Amino acid sequence: MKPSVVLYKSLPEDLRVRLDAHFNVTEINGLTPENIAAHAEAFRQAEGILGSGGKVDVEFLQQAPKLRAASTISVGYDTFDVAALNDKGIVLMHTPTVLTETVADTMMALVLSSARRVVELAERVKAGEWQKNIGPDWFGIDVHHKKLGILGMGRIGLALAQRAHLGFSMPILYNARKHHQEAEDRFDAQYCDLDTLLAESDFLCISLPLTAETHHLIGREQLAKMKPSAILINAGRGPVVDEQALVDALKDGTIFAAGLDVFEQEPLPVNSELLKLRNVVPLPHIGSATHETRYGMARDAVDNLIAALTGKVEKNCVNPQVLKQG
Ligand code: GLV
Ligand code: GLV
């Protein structure tokens, strides 16, 4: 008998065919805390889950006693309680490589659009405000040759450094848990402590996962150390930045602008103060959201689940120690 799996979102046709060839698939779109009970039997039987629909924690795992593998269609896995998965010997798979270049493109788009006020000025043109030659109140600030600071030098940070350094002649500073030799060798990236990164960066680009250590890593005190001309870019996870402190810093001129793809609450509530600020470029968490890359992520997640449930994991595993416990 084929193992049962729960699928959290519709897949492209060819990938669904591949998944069906290996598993008995129950597709649940729009899982909520309210309707989870209606799907109790599917979770009771599930040996695998593909995608994510809310927290996968101790409570969830009680409803899925046969679970052996979880495969998320993302690089981030902060909605999974990895310790709880480890306890039960459940393998967690993610998609860390396929989206790297696309997310770095998104970060560069935020750098350019917040510095040059692309979105705001386009809106003014569309509103019919371009009636005569523009003056300094339409000007932005330069990107090329400015210092780009990267907080969290992983694959995405490296791809951003490549764009900024080679394409825009930007000196690269970075802070991370450890030195990144390739970033230093290829893009002349300079390692520095967080305070130096805050004080010297013209663009502070955050590419960190959300963990207990990174939650509110950037708060009032850290924002106060940045230049008044600095721009904060966050495409990691919203809660790495204290959002209220950021709102205040953007309002009172502590920093110049922010380009944000992620927020403390998503979707961003329509009454968020961030939406009232001229100097914010808010995006709807589209870091990896291109047709090509979202397809690639879904394909990798399907392959990851097949590998995990057939005991052939070679890559993309968050907790490989579970495999050794066998
Ligand atoms: C997107 O945010 C991801 O984690 O892939
Ligand atoms: C992880 O978040 C990365 O930067 O690759």
Image (tube, rainbow, N blue to C red):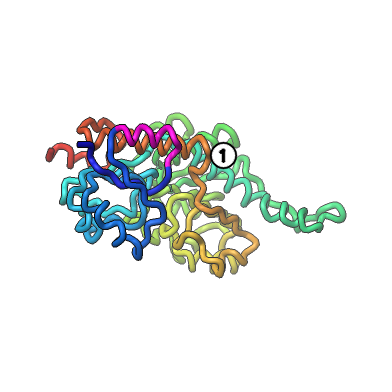
Q: Quadrant of the C terminus?
A: top left
- Residue 59 lies within the magenta run: no
Check disc 1 and report the residue beneath it.
Answer: 170
For mark 1, does the 10 Å Cα neighbourhood hold few (<14), some (14 to 19), or many (20 or more) residues?
many
- Identified by mark 1, the residue type is Met
Residue 272, above or below 236? below
The secondary structure that dominates the magenta segment is: helix
Q: Quadrant of residue 221?
A: bottom left
Name the one closer to the observer, 64 or 77.
64
Whether residue 66 is visible: yes
User: Residue, x 40% and y 31% (percent of image)?
Assistant: 182
x%, y% of residue 116?
A: 67, 49
x%, y% of residue 101?
A: 49, 36
As drawn, is 192 to the left or to the right of 289? Answer: left
Split into quadrants, the picture shows ligand 2 in the one at top left
- Magenta residues, as a range? 11-21
